[in-house]
Amino acid sequence: MAQNLVPPHHIAIVMDGNGRWAKRRFLPRLAGHKQGVDVLRRCVQACAQRGVGVLTVFAFSSENWNRPQEEVSGLMELLAKALSREVPQLLRDGVQLHFVGERAGLSDKVREGLAQGEAATAHNTRLVLNVCFNYGGRWDMAQAAAKLAARGEPITETSLNAAMALAHVPDPDLLIRTGGEMRLSNFLLWQAAYSELYFSDKLWPDFDDAALDEAIAAFHARERRFGKTSEQILSAPSALARA
Ligand code: FPP
């Protein structure tokens, strides 16, 4: 990784390709998801080591309920098991866990595991890990608007932003999607407005530290203009300070 460069503060990832990884090995799709959990564990540690402050991952979308029942229940079971197994390591690594998504519709066991995992890691400060589960960007915008309407509050960009499920973190700087597809699939529709998008052909179970470093290097090569011109960005005091 390039030296002396500030890492993206917030990285978001669509962990795509578990099914294809398993299929290529003549394994059931769930074997790919299991491998995906191992890679996620490694990715959390790699992000913490690189000074990333927030990692947000898409683990189960509002639309994933439409998958075969066996895969859906397998993913629920995987989450419940991962929560009980991984929390001690998250504690050691200084990771603060947040569940982002609609809890209604999840089993009591999963809901309890999520609440316990969040409570146990609440005081950690090294890395915030947001696991988006039963999450969709449209759901988030709708629930935020409904919350404001119920309180009789005006709907503005600021109030909506504060009512969203990811209000506890700044917007992602870098959004990675693995698996070769180039779409958002209802992930962070509001928060990704100015994220740098990076698409990797690697399937998620193959996404290793080197692949993460490539994504971060690509991020560093981008010029983030936030609607301004290149000249404005280059003449800004912060740009001069960096030079
Ligand atoms: C998309 O790959 C992946 C998912 C729908 C699940 C992602 C989950 C993990 C990586 C495991 C972490 C999960 C928990 C429970 C913490 P895909 O199945 O769509 O792959 P394909 O495009 O190759 O079929």
Image: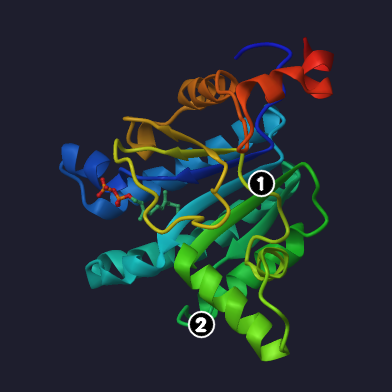
What separation in Å lies between label 1 and label 2 (alpha carbons)?
A: 28 Å
> Looking at this view, is 208 or 160 the one in front?
160
Q: Which residue is mark 2?
A: 104
Going by the numbered disc 1, the residue's amino acid type is Gln
Mark before the other along the chain sequence, 1 or 2: 1
Circle 2: element type: loop
Write the residue at 54% across / 69% down: 140
Rendering coords of residue 237 (x, y %): 84, 21
Rendering coords of residue 144 (x, y %): 61, 74
> Looking at this view, is 102 or 114 the one in front?
102
> Looking at this view, is 210 or 61 the one in front?
61
Numbered-mark total: 2
Of labels 1 and 2, the one closer to you: 2
Indicate whether 201 appears above or below 64. Answer: above
- Crowd around label 2: few <14 · some 14–19 · many ≥20 (10 Å): few
Write the residue at 75% across / 62% down: 120
Write the residue at 55% across / 25% down: 219
Indicate whether 18 appears above or below 107. Answer: above
Circle 1: element type: helix
Q: Is residue 37 visible?
A: yes
Rendering coords of residue 130 (x, y %): 61, 54
Q: Which residue is mark 1?
A: 89
Rendering coords of residue 46 (x, y %): 61, 31
Instruction: Specify whether 243 is left or right of 219.
Output: right
The C terminus, quarter of image: top right
The N terminus, quarter of image: top right
Indicate whether 144 appears above or below 35. Answer: below
Q: Based on the displayed image, in which of its 4 quarters is residue 182 positioned?
A: top left
Q: Based on the displayed image, in which of its 4 quarters is residue 149 positioned?
A: bottom right
Going by the numbered disc 2, the residue's amino acid type is Ala
Question: Is the residue at mark 2 in contact range of ligand 1, meaning its CB lies under 8 Å from it?
Answer: no
